């Protein structure tokens, strides 16, 4: 969920033309932040061993810093319609492409080709609701598997 949120924020701020460049910069900054957090965690665990409960404070601090970073994004900078791939068409109607996966669409490349083939000005659809997402068995199963994988680690 975090990567999807990061991608949506990046797309809403910089748009699709500059998305690849800024996504790469954001991913590099993410890896650098993880490296710094791990180095600090290593120093804290070395200094305070065997009292390693301080490690939770290190990771909690970095989590709080992430929340503060998102809250520091100025109001109005994110174009939410662009982040959700919505565009205004004639008559102030909104058009979008549904991003729900189907059983026949299993690869990201096939999904990207499907998005490229649809003309946004000719499609008049509403964004996918949370209830529609929960009715998609493949999507729910994927989330259950990912949740179980994270819990097993």
Image (spheres, grey):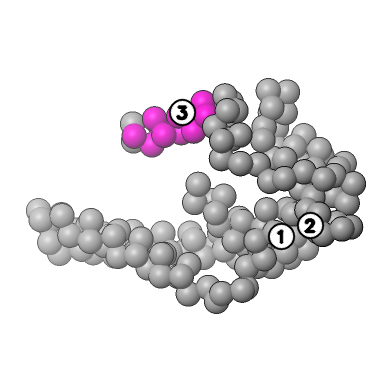
Residue that label 1 marks: 82
Labels 2 and 1 touching (C-beta < 8 A)? yes
* Quarter assignment of residue 144: top left
Furthest-left residue in this view = 50
With respect to residue 24, does 149 lie above or below? above
Which comes sooner in the sequence, label 2 or label 3? 2
Which comes sooner in the sequence, label 2 or label 1? 1
Q: Position of residue 63 (x, y in %)?
A: 35, 61
Residue that label 3 marks: 145
Q: Position of residue 36 (x, y in %)?
A: 38, 65
Choose between 8 and 81: the one closer to the eye: 81
Magenta residues (range) = 140-151
Q: Is residue 4 left or right of residue 115?
A: left
Screen quadrant of the C terminus: top left
What secondary structure characterizes most of the magenta part?
helix
With respect to residue 87, does 110 lie above or below? above
Which comes sooner in the sequence, label 1 or label 3? 1
Q: Position of residue 89 (x, y in %)?
A: 85, 56
Query: Disc 1 vs disc 3: which is toward the camera?
Result: 1
Q: Position of residue 48 (x, y in %)?
A: 12, 61
Query: Mark 3: which secondary structure?
Result: helix
Residue that label 2 marks: 87
* Residue lying at 88% horizontally and 51% vertically, measured from the top left: 121
Residue 95 visible? The answer is yes
Whether 146 is among the magenta residues is yes
Whether 101 is among the magenta residues is no
Marks 2 and 3 sit apart, C-alpha to C-alpha, by 33 Å
Residue 24 visible? The answer is no
């Amino acid at each position: 969920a975090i990567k999807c949120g990061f991608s949506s924020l990046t797309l809403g701020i910089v748009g699709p033309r500059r998305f690849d460049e800024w996504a790469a910069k954001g991913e590099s900054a993410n890896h650098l932040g993880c490296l710094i957090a791990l180095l600090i965690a290593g120093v804290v665990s070395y200094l305070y061993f065997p009292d390693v409960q301080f490690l939770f404070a290190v990771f909690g601090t970095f989590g709080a810093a992430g929340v503060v970073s998102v809250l520091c994004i100025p109001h109005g900078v994110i174009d939410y319609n662009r982040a959700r791939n919505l565009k205004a068409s004639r008559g102030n109607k909104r058009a979008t492409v549904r991003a729900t996966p189907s059983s026949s669409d299993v690869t990201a490349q096939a999904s990207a080709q499907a998005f490229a083939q649809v003309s946004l000005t000719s499609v008049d659809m509403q964004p996918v609701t949370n209830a529609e997402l929960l009715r998609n068995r493949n999507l729910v199963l994927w989330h259950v598997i990912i949740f179980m994988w994270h819990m097993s680690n």
